[in-house]
Amino acid sequence: MRLSLLALLAKEPAHGYELKQALELTFGDAYPSPNIGQIYVTLGRLEKDGLVRAVDVEQSNRPNKKVYYLTALGREKLEAWVDEPTEGPRVRDDFFMKLVLAPMTGIADRMALINRQRRHYLSLMRSLNELADGTDQANRVAHLLIEGAMLHLQADLDWLERCQEELP
Amino acid sequence: MTPKQLSTVIKTVNLGKIYQQGAVPVPAVRGVDLEIGAGEFVAVTGPSGSGKSTLVHMLGGLDKPSSGEIWLDGRRVDTLRESAWALLRRKKIGFVFQFFNLVANMTVADNVELPALLAGSSPKEARARREYLLDALGLTERSDAPPSQLSGGEQQRVALARALSNRPSLLLADEPTGNLDSRNTRDVLRLLGEVHRDGQTIVLVTHEARVASLADRVVSLLDGQVIDDGTIAVPRRRSRGGAGDVVELR
């Protein structure tokens, strides 16, 4: 979350709650909304590291609010993040370990493991379908995020099928 | 044991299909026992060559079984001759393939109305049904066009409308979203969901998990055999109204 907050602050200074709203508005329901406490903790760490600074802004009839802005160091950090290529997902699949190792010990049947996993993936796919149905068509960011998740899930299912064909 | 049961639409008993490839017999479907109830939406999945298309082709009488039985609406049908099958399909079965066979010299509207008329609907009923289906698939404006003026995605949707036009007991679909982009896929899936809620029985072959996950029940084939057959759990919703936990951004 550190870098997404830096990116939002590069656009304009903001206080914690505005950052939370900006994340929700941009990514829609597809994004697990961060709780406000998490955001303040992260902002505190960024401030300690010198990447953001905070100023108190007086408000009438309300306690002061802390508005955060990006420092030069913060901008450098953000630019470095944008410039470097991003690692793709790695195959580090807990299920695959289970699938290979469990039948060796005789405590599980490979076919049953695969079938159970397929049903689980399909039920995840179903929630993605529901999520897509319930997401505003105009929010392309959210829809692309959901579509990305669907494509990954389809790949997981295709791989499961390959395992079923190849493993004894 | 009596295969006749009111709520069962289609049932197979030890169904098998062997293709002759040169001198070698190749089993495509082996010992399939399926029972599909009225109003069920069943997805058939499996790797290519697992026998899923052969299976639904046999259910629609387009391919003859090598062994076993098929019962449709309580009547044994695998023993029927081709002419009897043709009659049965006209009355009770809707079929959608990945490649659609629309009648070239008829308008979209006439293509969709024809099966309803052949099955005995009045012209007024056929027309109302056609209007509903074309509207649901976003094709109303194309009603008077010949199929040749339609894009592949549009033709596919017309083929689905045609298959549903006679309100068949059973809708069979073989990769109905096979060559559609994501928007057209969404329209097709939405209509399938809608007719399913209205009680349409659907058996659909697909390799797309997104499509399969809409079914109530998924039958998985491998090497011509059913290796899994079960319902898909409806995911539990987390509190905040979104299934947002499915997607995780770091």
Image (cartoon, rainbow, N blue to C red):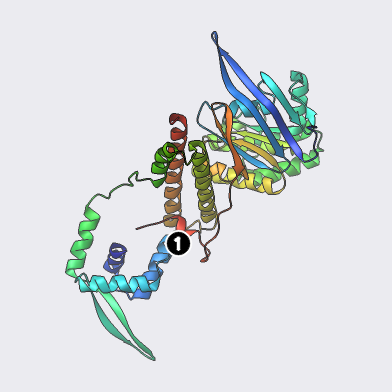
Give me the residue at 54% from left, 60% from top: B237
What element does badge 1 sit on?
Answer: helix
Observer able to see residue B102? no
Give me the residue at 63% from left, 40% from top: B42
Q: Position of residue B111 (x, y in %)?
A: 68, 33
Position of the N terminus of chain B, as image quadrant, is top right
Instruction: Specify whether A30 is left or right of B128.
Output: left
Q: Amino acid at mark 1?
A: Gly
Position of the C terminus of chain B, as image quadrant, is bottom left
Quarter location, residue A13: bottom left
Numbered circles on residues, count:
1
Q: Position of residue A131 (x, y in %)?
A: 52, 56
Instruction: Specify whether B94 is left or right of B52.
Output: right
Give me the residue at 24% from left, 49% from top: A85
* Subunit under mark 1: A
Q: Position of residue A18 (x, y in %)?
A: 37, 73
Relative to A81, does residue A9 appear above or below in the rendering?
below
Q: Position of residue A82 (x, y in %)?
A: 24, 56
Q: Nearer the viewer, residue B31 or B114?
A: B31
Quarter location, residue B189: top right
Relative to A75, does residue B208 appear above or below in the rendering?
above
Observer able to see residue B66? yes
Q: Nearer the viewer, residue B191 or B29?
A: B29
Instruction: Specify whether B250 is left or right of B167.
Output: left
Residue that lies at the very extreme toward the bottom in this rendered image: A61
Disc 1: which residue: A28
Instruction: Specify whether A130 is left or right of A83.
Output: right
